[in-house]
Image (tube, coloured by chain):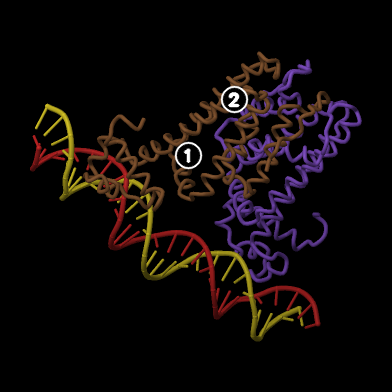
Chain colours: A brown, B purple, C yellow, D red
Amino acid sequence: MAEKNTVRCQIVEAAKKRFSHFGYAKTTMAEVAADCSMSPGNLYRFFPGKLDIAESIATEDYEKHLEALRKLAVAPNRTARERLHDLLFEELRRTYHKLERDPRAYEMATVIAHERPQYANWMLANERKILVQLFDEAEQRGEFAIDDKEITAEMIQSATMKFRYPQLWSKLTLPKLERELDGVLKLLVNGLCRGRTSSAGSEAAA
Amino acid sequence: MAEKNTVRCQIVEAAKKRFSHFGYAKTTMAEVAADCSMSPGNLYRFFPGKLDIAESIATEDYEKHLEALRKLAVAPNRTARERLHDLLFEELRRTYHKLERDPRAYEMATVIAHERPQYANWMLANERKILVQLFDEAEQRGEFAIDDKEITAEMIQSATMKFRYPQLWSKLTLPKLERELDGVLKLLVNGLCRGRTSSAGSEAAA
DNA sequence: AGATTGAACGGATTGTTGATTATTCAGAAA
DNA sequence: TTTCTGAATAATCAACAATCCGTTCAATCT
């Protein structure tokens, strides 16, 4: 990813600096080109447009996140329930901290989400694959009983939507969001119906 | 509600016509006043401001909705699960159709949500009361086993957030939303854990 | 040939100005 | 006195001009 195509990388790095310092809108293609000692027109031999540079930056970061999620999904010595917990919390915390720390990230997320609606779907689909894998394993171990794993993964995503882009839909603090996610997860795992009161209560949330 | 304070009512009715015909922004206080044969200044003896007229209209409509929900929550000859289903579907369908039918409603919802953030919380709290009542009954009948009903109601609202203001957060069609809500509800009721596969499948969704 | 430039195009954005409108309040009507 | 008015005010909005910037491409360089 960082090896091939050095010029592309140079452009991405220059843009990364500008975007995070001045924001996406306030950065011009001419500036990025100048940082790379080339003409604006030449950028278009490497990217179809400005937005694609932003997408490239976002994707690079997201791939790291995905890798972290994959690790959590197959962590040894953890129950399926615990691993599901870890996945959802990692998702919440990463997004929360990213938007908290860097207000520019919010701008980029908004622009990409608006101009490339499919991008968010692609991310969801990636994470669904991880969930399905987790469910497969959980079923073999007899922890979960799931009809259609792909559909179930979609439902989990539906139900945890509020925690995926936290500060977009509420002004809640991270601790409050964590408590809420923990509650939702407990419900999703145990259900409302009378049955196992699953001795394991909520895990540490602070 | 419609009896006392005839002048207030007259104002609300005039505003209702204007708002739904021309929209909130394109309606002026002077026009509403003229429709009531009074001066603009006089409106302020009955409402603190323009937004409060809109809120009044919204609340009047919402009270009807709440009443419908209360009825569904205590419908005889229905299991708790079915009543929960009815509540959530009524919520989804009402909002969906309201925004579908009348683009002006979308404008008003947006303005109120933006200028009066507490309004949405008030609505959620109202509906939580209904959920708690439903849970109380369900527990007595042995259908659900719930620790803290108030918290559980919050979690249900969290998990079904996507279906509360449907076209705000997705471009899905009503049938797709209904299928998804059905899936989420099934998960919330039964849980992921192996246990009862609850012979009752999903109820009619189309 | 292929790679690169930078001036030129047009769509979007910004700043400015003038008009509109929510809200107030001193005073007129009842 | 209480109820209402409508002109005054300050904030917002709409329209227009000027500028900016993403993108293209004919010309230049290697």
Please tell me how crowded label 1 is: few (under 14), some (14-19), or many (20+) other residues with Cα within 10 Å. Answer: some
The residue sitting at the right extreme is B140
Residue in front for this viewpoint, A117 or B195: B195
User: Which numbered dot is residue A103?
Assistant: none
* Residue carrying label 2: A75
Q: Secondary structure at mark 2?
A: loop
Image mark 1: chain? A
Image location (x, y in percent) of residue A121: 50, 30
Q: Is residue D15 left or right of residue A150?
A: left
* Quadrant location of the N terminus of chain A in the rendered image: top left
Vertical arrangement, residue B46 with respect to residue B69, above or below: below
Please tell me how crowded label 2 is: few (under 14), some (14-19), or many (20+) other residues with Cα within 10 Å. Answer: some
Q: Earlier in the sequence, mark 1 or mark 2?
A: 2
Q: CA distance from mark 1 to mark 2?
A: 31 Å
* Quadrant location of the C terminus of chain A in the rendered image: top right
* Residue carrying label 1: A113
Q: Amino acid at mark 1?
A: Ala
Image location (x, y in percent) of residue B31: 60, 62
Q: Residue at horizontal 81%, vertical 24%?
A: A196
Image mark 2: chain? A
Q: Is residue A111 left or right of residue A53?
A: right
Vertical arrangement, residue B41 with respect to residue A135, above or below: below
The residue sitting at the front extreme is A77
Q: Amino acid at mark 2?
A: Ala
User: Residue B40's image quarter?
Assistant: bottom right
| 1 vs 2, front mark | 2
Image location (x, y in percent) of residue B147: 83, 35
Labels in figure, total: 2
Image location (x, y in percent) of residue B179: 65, 25
Q: Residue at horizontal 76%, vertical 33%?
A: A201
Q: Residue at horizontal 22%, vertical 44%?
A: A38
> Are labels 1 and 2 assigned to the same chain?
yes
